[in-house]
Image (cartoon, rainbow, N blue to C red):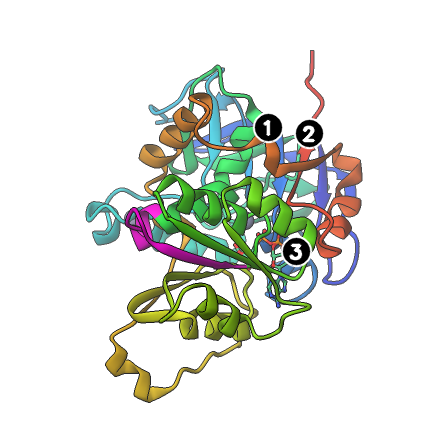
Amino acid sequence: MKAAVYYRANEPLSLEELELLEPQRNEVTVRIEAAGVCHSDLHFIDGLLPHPTPAVLGHEGAGVVETVGEGVTYVQPGDHVILSFIPSCGQCPYCIAGRPNLCTVGNRAAVRGTLLDGTTRLRKGEQEIYHMTCTSCFAERSVVPESSLVRIRDDMPLDRAALIGCGVMTGVGAVINTAKVQAGSVVAVIGCGGVGLNVVQGASLSGAVKIIAVDVSDFKLELAQQFGATHTVNAATDPDVVGAIRQLSPGGADYAFEVIGRPEAMRQAYDATRRGGMAIVVGLAPAGAEVSIPAASFLQEKVLTGSSYGGARPRIDMPKLIDLYLAGKLKLDELISRRYPLDGINDAFQALREGEVARSVIQFQVEG
Ligand code: APR
Ligand code: ZN
Ligand code: ZN
């Protein structure tokens, strides 16, 4: 099968023919129909985060189940699925407590670049190729753990379903699950790319009355308005982001989200939050980065928290997001700026780097 292989940081992905081994116990082969191009993949490609190499990246995908390994009961061939990039074991204290996004079982595999049993299913000749987050969807097919799958309605278009696998779940979930934004609130969103736009629309869905979008790109700020932003701040021309937010919301925002992965912007989100308000970090920072806050501000009783995968309970939340989309209450079409074949994946990453797109989708050929 054709796949895009990551060999070294700061080099283009290499398009190659790979061998995909059979699914083992509790594993499933999925034919990938669409994969979103997210900034987290770019963090690896640009060398900001380490990853075992060579590897097939891609963690925002959807497709159709092709074959199932021994012991699989959740899906059967032909089922439409979204890949969740945090598999949930169902048995650890986090899974039992209803917080599967914190399940540590998948994390170990993700760090090693393997599936859950510590081995890989990707080969180039004799050479072993690593997986990313048990998803590796920049390839025509992927073998994934059953616990990484979310079964979805057949009438949901798979290109838009793919986006729910990361950006939409992460953004909307940060608002609904992590922050639990109250109707009538003032929300600031710093960084309005593929994930940040979903924070904006999550705030809109939650009934926020003022939504202040911050970005360095007018293109993104215009999109943010389409997604429900009521005010915009261009941080390139107006570097006093905190002042601008506080001017629009005296005393500070009820909730401020950082959706870039920059420590400076995390601090801005904290500073822009009112006493007793909440700052939520969604962005993934480079390895080793730190952020500091004024110690005296603790008495303002602000809550500073992270949000991983939008606090997702994937098999509950993702089907709900699909229902919202099909009911006309969630925007997904507007997120897709461009579509590329797998061969165009390096162009898609360049466009993301240049800030030209909200999301690009890699669309795979439908086979006979
Ligand atoms: N101030 C405001 N906005 C900024 C700044 C800045 N200093 N620098 C960059 N931005 C904006 C970009 O213009 C872009 O619109 O942040 C946005 C980032 O969006 P994308 O590149 O589309 O990234 P996305 O896929 O949304 O991911 C955002 O969330 O999941 C994590 O790893 C991901 O850390 C990344 C973050
Ligand atoms: Zn992502
Ligand atoms: Zn678990």
Front residue of 120/218: it is 218
Residue under the image location 62 percent in, 51 percent down: 221
* Residue 355 on the magenta span: no
Front residue of 144/95: it is 95
Measure the C-alpha gap from mark 2 to mark 3. 18 Å
Q: Which residue is mark 2?
A: 363
Looking at marks 1 and 3 on the same chain, the residue that comes earlier in the sequence is marked by 3
Disc 2 packing (10 Å; few <14; some 14–19; many ≥20): many
Q: Secondary structure at mark 3?
A: helix
Q: Hey, which quadrant is residue 153 in on the image?
A: top left
* Residue 178 on the magenta span: yes
Residue under the image location 38 percent in, 86 percent down: 294
Measure the C-alpha gap from mark 1 to mark 3. 20 Å
Left or right relative to 238: residue 332: left
Name which residue type carries label 3.
Leu
Q: Which residues are magenta?
A: 176-190
Q: Position of residue 312 (x, y in %)?
A: 36, 44
Q: Which residue is mark 3?
A: 42
Looking at marks 1 and 2 on the same chain, the residue that comes earlier in the sequence is marked by 1
Q: Which residue is mark 1?
A: 159
Q: Position of residue 278 (x, y in %)?
A: 33, 64
Q: Is residue 257 visible?
A: yes
Pointer 1 with pointer 2, Cβ within 8 A? yes
Disc 3: residue Cβ within 8 A of ligand 1's nearest atom:
yes
Residue under the image location 69 percent in, 11 percent down: 368
